Amino acid sequence: MSNEHRRRIRHERTLFGSGRDPFRDPATCHSHQYRRDCAPIGSAGPLSGCVIAPPIPEDQRLQESTLLREFERARPRILGGLLDAISSALKNHAMVVVPSLPRMADFAVWVTAAEPGLGWPAGTFLSAYWDNLSSANELALEASPITTTLLKLLSQQGGWKGTSAELLQVLESMASPAVQRNESWPKNARSLSGQIRRLAPNLRKAGWEIRSIRRSHHRILEFVPWMPVRGREGPAGRV
């Protein structure tokens, strides 16, 4: 690790406290590429927005000084647009109807109320929001080395029940040596249990609910089919 990396870590621990890992904290992970391909794992998914910026063509690249000058010229129009959106949200907030609220309920209602001021058709924001969550969930599952093998097992057997140690043995018998060489592949039952626990919200959206049952000195994991409830399957939010 370079001296510059050490300096940045010390700086962020000063800002966020030594008890928080700046490379894993949702507030700072955007600057450290911790979550590969913008893949929020577990309960962070509904609280995250996954935006993948398109590449800038070579003939459209600008120096920072040029970009700032253009921004200064555009700033009055940007401010006017934001004020139009805020005015619309304040006017329509009490009349918004959202049949199925996401976890960021107030945010969803507020932006839905602002849609007329933004020139968006009714339901534009929630449609994009649910699509974004679906894409982020898929990315989170793809980022885990155990997911493909686990979902194959569940699909073949229609579910599964047993201890973490038993599940690890089954996954190891199904996964290729190349997959098991991945540094994130669980090395023991405890590691697998932790990964399953963190992936539980993502697996639920993929159609599998995980139940943990305490029996004697063992904890049993049970994977059962679960029908995802998608907010966008109902009517979109409207004013």
Image (cartoon, helix red, strand yellow):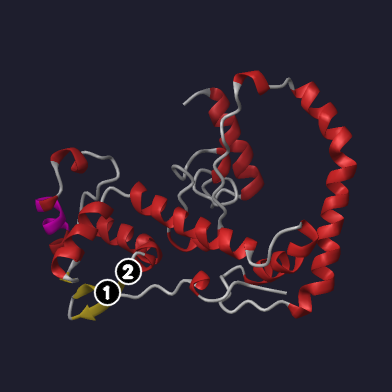
Kindly report the distance in space between the C-alpha atoms of the residues bearing marks 1 and 2: 6 Å
Give the numbered dot on residue 192. Answer: none
**Residue type, label 1:** Pro
- Position of residue 92 measured from the top left corner of the image (x, y, whole percent): 79, 73
Q: Is residue 44 visible?
A: no
Look at the numbered disc 2 and give the secondary structure of its residue.
loop
What residue is shown at x 68% (from left), y 73% (from top)?
Answer: 238
Residue picked out by circle 1: 225
Vertical side of 58 occupied by 97: above or below: below
Quarter containing the C terminus: bottom right
- Position of residue 187 measured from the top left corner of the image (x, y, whole percent): 21, 49
Q: Is residue 194 magenta?
A: no
Q: Is residue 83 left or right of residue 226?
A: right
Q: How many neighbours does mark 1 have within 10 angstroms: few (below 14), some (14-19), or many (20 or more)?
A: some
Are circles 1 and 2 on residues that touch, CB within 8 Å?
yes
- Magenta span covers which residues? 168-173
Residue picked out by circle 2: 207
Vertical side of 166 occupied by 66: above or below: above
What residue is shown at x 56% (from left), y 48% (from top)?
Answer: 18
Vertical side of 181 occupied by 174: above or below: below
- Position of residue 116 measured from the top left corner of the image (x, y, whole percent): 77, 64
Q: Is residue 55 left or right of residue 92?
A: left
Q: Main secondary structure of the magenta part?
A: helix
Q: Nearer the viewer, residue 192 or 7?
A: 192
Q: Nearer the viewer, residue 211 or 107?
A: 107
What residue is shown at x 36% (from left), y 47% (from top)?
Answer: 143
Q: Nearer the viewer, residue 226 or 126?
A: 126
**Residue type, label 2:** Gly
- Residue 201, quarter of picture: bottom left
- Position of residue 154 measured from the top left corner of the image (x, y, whole percent): 20, 65
The residue most toward the front is: 121
